[in-house]
Image (cartoon, grey):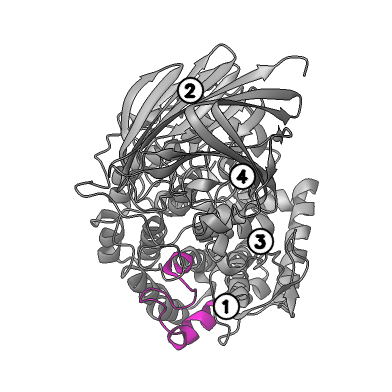
Amino acid sequence: MTTKQLLFIALIATTTLSHAQTATKPAKPVPWPGIVALPTFTHNNPAQAFSEYKVYNAQGSPIRMPREDWARARQLVQHDPAWQVWLKKTRVAMDDWMAKRRDHVEWTCGWFHDFVSPKDGSQLIWTPEFPGATLASKSDPAAQVTPKILGGWVFAFRSAHANKMADAARLYRLTGEKIYAEWAAAQLDFYADHYTEWPVFRGSSRIMWQSLDEAVNLIKYVQTARFLGDFATPERKSKWKGKLFKPDAELLERSGQTIQNIPCWQRSAEAVTALYCQDEALWNQAVKGPFGIRSQVTKGISDDYIWYEQSMGYNAYVVLALVPFFREALVSGRGESLRPLMEAVENLMLAPMAMRFPNGQLPNPADSGKAGIVPDFGLLLETADIFPTKLSLQKLSATKNWMTLLDPPAPDSGAMTLPPVVSRKMESTRFAILHAAPWQVYFHFGQLGNAHAQAEALNYEAFYDNTDVTHDPGTVGYGSPMSGGYYRKGVCVNMPLVDGLGQEGWHPGRLDKFGTTSVTASQPLYRKNAEASRTLTIVGNQLTDITTVRALDQKNHALGFVLNLQGKVRLTEAFGDNPSFASTRKQTGFEYWTKPRIARFKDKAILLVDYKGLVLRVELKLLGDFTLTCGSAPDYPPARRDAIYLETQGQTATLETRFTPMLNQ
């Protein structure tokens, strides 16, 4: 992979946060009494799930044995012009990095969630040059560099530096040029010699700000040592093991004692370290311990093969965490007993494709960033040496990287047409999919635990053919006040609200009814003082949403419903300015709306919404008087979108919303 791709994978790491590191993250949702966070999952015959995507070997297994054929790799770079070009580019990039970049003990690593614009939460642009007074994002040309932002830059530097160390060791094995081996070994010396000079952050990391990032880099450090082989003397190897690898692995074991995506990285790093150090006790702890890799896979992956924290990004992230361990185990001859775990993890990679919208966009529950797109060829190609798929074979032969150099792919089996998306009851994950052309709807009716839960149970996303009607924008970096102040709140998605607030805490909810064109679910403890339910139905070319919210305290409340739209709402003269709208709804997220306009209705309101090539008639029916406010709301930054908020007063309210395409409009 390129440095840019590897850095991107490293940056994905910062979309999650360990349970012990919550000082700057918004407060976690609290479960309702009596809720058990993790149900029991059963992975029945995982080798055959999603078989239409897989490539099976002669023994009927979808798991492939990876290879590191250095002799053949040397022949390729000596005789194949395309590989010679690749090697030249790789060497030039490495020479430049070695000449200009080095780590510093005095640099204090931070959190990449803080590497955002204070203006709008947009991601700052990272380069390996040490920052000056300002940095830029796509929407903020001059963000002042603060200590937190600088700490985020150091995180990205050390992540990229670790990747370069492993690449330098590979270059040595490939070319025999000792300059690369000595540089890579010198970097390991640096971290081993200075390891104890960095303070212990939050009890579980030193070099990086959090144990997650420490684990990601430890894998790269150990891989660097393995690739160097006998270049390093026994004494040097002993120093790396005794002063860096094993102390770091032991430090990682202090945290992540739970079932969650981050411990997958921690245990993976510990297990990779155990293999290199031939430490059986560390292996048993990392693989077989109560929160080891076996438990993470069997307890963290739902029967729908979705990671229980529900984010599609975490599906990919857990795969990226465990694949290096699986690869090292297979290469070392210790992978055979792990095959059932590998089969489940491969399904974790493939399952989101069965949920994709017509344009390939994924639903975006929980608190990852912008919605992903599938097929994710970056992920498919990164894992193709052990998880070969028909999709990866289409592109693998044209891909030039270390994997395809050392382990040339099998011949392309021909183009693959993705299987159609169908309606699915994903009760194990608390999701449902409705697909009845022209509509496709994703419904998120509950959560399985507090990790990364947001105020979004009963939210839905919808497409009309290829038109994105409404989606969940995701969450910006936790370092932005907008993360907790807006993106994690009910106002950001399509939710019933009580006094401006959405779901309180988290709850698995109840799936009341499911059919291929209709689904009903409820949240009996939506808030301490309210319950809610929603029915979504597709009939012909019309989508209907019937949502009820009911107060449980026999008091009147402001009962509301928010609808975020990717189209432009046509407002009539009935709508007037409402400058006090945000100020009367503080701490709800509405303060991030701009240009609010309000109108009063009774029983029914009809709006037309313009999309590219489509006009939707949105009919809102609620008995009695209500107000309708339309404003500009944040989408994923820097984009914005139109949003509608319907509000009435009372103890119970039922809103029926009908989406109907208009012809000749």
Residue position for label 4: 378
- Name which of mark 4 and mark 3 comes first in the sequence: 3
- Name which of mark 2 and mark 4 comes first in the sequence: 4
Q: Nearer the viewer, mark 3 or mark 2?
A: 3
Residue 623, compared with residue 195, is above or below; it is: above
Residue position for label 2: 434
Distance from disc 1 to disc 2, alpha carbons, whole Å, reads: 53 Å
Label 1: few (<14), some (14–19) or many (≥20) C-alpha neighbours in 10 Å: some
The residue sitting at 46% across, 44% down in the picture is 315
Q: Amino acid at mark 4?
A: Gly
Residue 120 is tagged as 3
> Secondary structure under badge 4?
helix
Q: Which residues are magenta?
A: 185-214
Residue 509 placed where, x, y %? 32, 37
Decide if residue 37 is on the left or right side of residue 203: left
Q: Is residue 317 magenta?
A: no
Distance from disc 2 to disc 4, alpha carbons, whole Å, reads: 28 Å
